[in-house]
Image (spheres, rainbow, N blue to C red):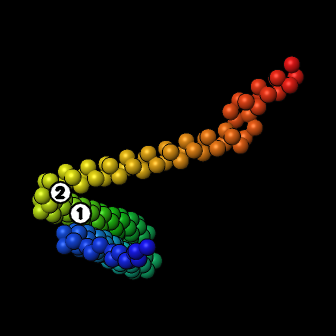
Amino acid sequence: MAEEKPTKPAAKKPAEEVVEAVEAAVTETAEAAQEAAAEVAEVVKATAKEVAKTTRKSAEKVVSTAKKGATKASKSAEKGVSKTATTAKKAARKVEEAVDEATEGAVGRLGKSFDEFMEHQRKAVEEAGKALESLIPEGVRTHGRSAIEEAIEGYRKLVNSVVDQLNETLKRVVPGGDGKEDEKEEAAEG
């Protein structure tokens, strides 16, 4: 008997290594871009909230100061302060809304830019795949496809054969599986 030599695992072809490297780079770039986009969005949102908070505090200080002065003034002055407070609150709300809209717009534009970035990355991977495919001769591709189809057909035949053998074994083992048990019982009764 001849000794079998252990087979060495097939070395990766340069084209496969390039494809894996490109895929890894695209994945890393996409993940980094998503993380950066999330960080930028959080910073913009936090800054916008801080601006709104500062504006609101300033408006509240103005209102507070106006109310203190109104207490000392006449009733007509109180009416003016009330109007000023309402106007200041409205202005603060408008600033806050404007900041929220600006924040959402910035995040939306960032999302569009990220989508465009991902589309370019997808196209780059497709083109790299086509470039690698063009390195493989047409005959190798054709015969490679045929080899895969033949391997699949071989497995299909093997599985079908096992299923058929299981069915035959079940028919022999399970009482009444082939119908002969019922015939024997009828003959014994009759």
Q: Which mark is residue 140?
A: 2
Frontmost residue, 24 versus 139: 139
User: The residue under label 1 is which amino acid type?
Assistant: Met
> What residue is rendered at 23% in x and 69% in y?
16
Could you say where residue 147 lies in the image, as x and y percent from the top left? 28, 53
From the viewer's perspective, is the residue at label 1 or at label 2 nearer? 2
Of all residues, the one furthest to the top in this rendering is 190
Could you say where residue 21 lies in the image, as x and y percent from the top left? 23, 74
> In the image, is 80 to the left or to the right of 133?
right
> In the image, is 47 to the left or to the right of 158?
left
User: The residue under label 2 is which amino acid type?
Assistant: Val
> Which quadrant of the structure image shows residue 180?
top right
> In the image, is 80 to the left or to the right of 166?
left
Residue 168 can be seen in this image: yes
Residue 116 can be seen in this image: no
Q: Disc 1 marks which residue?
A: 118
Could you say where residue 161 lies in the image, as x and y percent from the top left? 50, 45
Could you say where residue 171 lies in the image, as x and y percent from the top left? 67, 38
Q: Secondary structure at mark 1?
A: helix
Spatial CA distance of label 1 from label 2 is: 32 Å
The N terminus: image quadrant:
bottom left
The C terminus: image quadrant:
top right
> What residue is rendered at 69% in x and 40% in y?
172
Q: Secondary structure at mark 2?
A: helix
Of all residues, the one furthest to the front in this rendering is 1
First of labels 1, 2 by sequence position: 1
Frontmost residue, 130 versus 137: 137
> Which quadrant of the structure image shows residue 90?
bottom left
Rendered view: 152 above or below 183: below
Rendered view: 129 above or below 184: below
> Which quadrant of the structure image shows residue 87?
bottom left
